[in-house]
Amino acid sequence: MIREAVLKDLKDILRIFNYNIKNTTAVYHYDERSPEEMRHWFDLKIQQGFPVIVEEMEGEVVGFATFGTYRPFRGFDKTVEHSIYVDAEYRGRGIGKKLLFALMDLAKEKRFHIMVAYIDSENAVSLKIHENAGFFYCGKIKEAGYKFEKFLDLVIMQYFLE
């Protein structure tokens, strides 16, 4: 079941996000987030009118997603960038796809024009999910990131919401 996140979900959101920081290139952060940092992030999303949604299975949050400001300039007000994270034990069950489509619907409701995805080039599953959802390839930034002792390429994809 996909639903809006509430404060009690932050513990699971933090667990999922920190797992991805420590173990994947889905996010290029090095340092795990604290509960206080996640609370600040959540409060800011709500304050700015951006969604934070979760996939709940049998009472447990197994994935979360959000979108927010693409660039902090007025000329980009109609473009959003999104993030989706799924608990490692629940990958391969279509949760990321469901969260992506839910985000796309929310962005359309809010009358945004474009949704942008920045995806590590080795994340074949995410690239395929986005392609199947109608996102198209815009380009690649070679060696944009560095994690796990190697340079990482970042793929840019976009989707027209209108």
Image (spheres, rainbow, N blue to C red):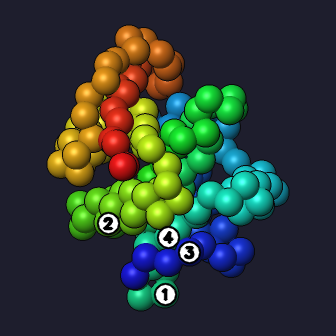
Q: Crowding at label 4, few (<14), some or many (≥20) Cα neighbours within 10 Å?
A: many
Say what secondary structure mark 1 lies in: loop
Choose the circle earlier in sequence order: 3 or 2.
Answer: 3
Choose the circle earlier in sequence order: 4 or 2.
Answer: 4
Q: Residue furthest top?
A: 142
Q: Nearer the viewer, residue 44 or 74?
A: 74
Q: Which residue is rendered at x = 47% and y = 16% of the image?
A: 144
Q: Which residue is mark 3?
A: 4
Mark identifier at residue 21: none
Question: How far apart, in angstroms, are the residues tagged by discs 1 and 3?
Answer: 14 Å
Q: Crowding at label 3, few (<14), some or many (≥20) Cα neighbours within 10 Å?
A: few
Q: Which residue is rendered at x = 49% and y = 49% of the image?
A: 112
Q: Which residue is mark 1?
A: 59
Is residue 69 visible in this depiction of the protein? yes
Circles 3 and 4: CB distance less than 8 Å?
Answer: yes
> Of the residues shown, which amino acid type is indicated by label 2?
Lys
Q: Which residue is rendered at x = 24% and y = 67% of the image?
A: 93
Give the foreground label among 1 and 3: 3
Q: Nearer the viewer, residue 109 or 154?
A: 109
> Of the residues shown, which amino acid type is indicated by label 4?
Val
Q: Which residue is mark 2?
A: 98
Q: Which residue is mark 4?
A: 54
Circles 4 and 1: CB distance less than 8 Å?
Answer: no
